[in-house]
Image (cartoon, rainbow, N blue to C red):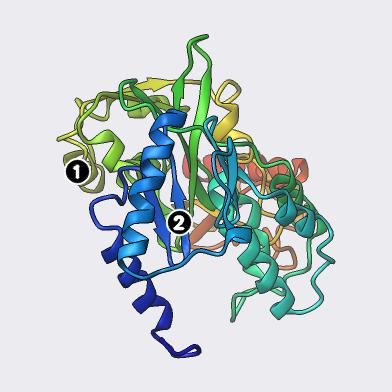
Amino acid sequence: MPFGLMNSSNTFQAMMSHVLRGLNWKFVLVYVDDILIFSRTFEDHLNHLSQVFDRLRHANLKLHPSKCHFAVKEIMFLGHIISREGVKVDPAKTSAVSKFPTPLTQKQLRSFLGMANYYRRFIKDHSKIVFPLHSLLYKDQPVKLKWTQTAFDTIKHALVNAPGLSYPDLDKPFILTCDASDTAIAFVLGQLNSDKKEYAIAYGNKSLTKEERNYTTSEKECLAILKVVETFRPYLANSAFTVITDHNALVWLKSAKHTSRLSRWALKLQDLNFDIIHRPGKSNVVADCLSRVPNPFQATQIDTLSITTQEQGISSFDSIETQVSSENLSSESDNEVQFGAEVHFYYASNMQQIVKNVLLYLLLILKTFKT
């Protein structure tokens, strides 16, 4: 087969899959010219090697001895270290990440994010961490965004210190830990070991679209459950599992009446055997650790309140109105609050904004109930 052809890799992969048909996924994994043979015992390993050699000999394929490793406890495969304990990130790759310089252009930033995305399954809350960096690549931003070194350093630290992932035990029940924030949802697939301690099998996350960010809190939390079930459905379809959430309202997802969107999602989960358990956010540290970190780039609208008022001079709230006005609640700030027919409350990223929102609520209450 000539080198350099566009379909060379696909053709070679198809040929290797044909040569090793019947052995794939039993004790062999093949990716182009990389063949991984896994066995429980040394005797089984010798038998498996003999079967693979027979297939390669029959296909007139040869192996390079210097590129082969036999009877090892762990091995490098596609940028991962695989052993009986689980899967870990290649230290050589994490070393390159730790030395990656601060990106100065969008091209350099894309290169770094591409490296980070390859190992995203090892990083909890990956989408939440990289959201500020991805925002720098978007076009037509409503406000001019600035570089944040914190997000860059956080994702580098997470990659360098990425934990190993264990293999799933299909004889044990699974535990799904879900959480949602204003910008992303995160989830963890895990199980309990012999000491009744949870261990991670895989991390997953998804950035919310513009429309999904307008969902209610219950809808975001339910969306996290829906996405984790869709992602790990092959493991969950025929076994009982437990969903852990820090949103207490979802405990009644399977029995209470819901809005049309929640009802549709509940129907999608109806064929699965699972229970939902509430765990407070302070205890749900794995999926919740970055859920409450405010987005440093843009204010996220969390509620919209429409109020129609008549202009009447009522002395009872004049002082509050004056106080609110003195706080400069104008469009000069990124977290702006607009007065008028519609009043928008935005994510309070600091104490000053919280005070402004409280004053605004008092003003609206007094105007609503004035006589």
Seen at 49% across and 48% down, the residue is 205
Frontmost of labels 1 and 2 is 2
| Residue at the disc numbered 1 | 268
Q: Nearer the viewer, residue 194 or 130?
A: 194
Q: Residues within 10 Å of mark 1 (few under 14, many from 20)?
A: few
Q: Which image quarter holds the N terminus?
A: bottom left
Question: Which quadrant holds residue 142?
Answer: bottom right
* 305 lies left or right of 255: right
Picture layout, residue 291 above or below residue 128 = above
Give how far across and how far down residue 153 sits, in percent. Answer: 79, 53
Q: Secondary structure at mark 2?
A: strand
Choose the circle earlier in sequence order: 1 or 2: 2
The residue under the point 64% across, 37% down is 163
Up/down of 94 relative to 363, above or below:
below
Residue ID at (75%, 49%) = 154
Residue 57 in view here: yes
Please tell me in which quadrant of the rendered image residue 250 appears. Answer: top left
In the rendered image, residue 273, in percent from the top left (x then y), is placed at: 21, 26
Q: For mark 2, what is the residue? A: 35
Counting the numbered discs, the total is 2
202 vs 28, nearest the viewer: 28
- Mark 2: which amino acid? Ile
User: Helix, strand, or loop for circle 1?
Assistant: helix
Residue type at mark 1: give it.
Lys
Q: Visible in this render: residue 219? A: no
Question: Which residue is more in the foreground, 21 or 54?
Answer: 54
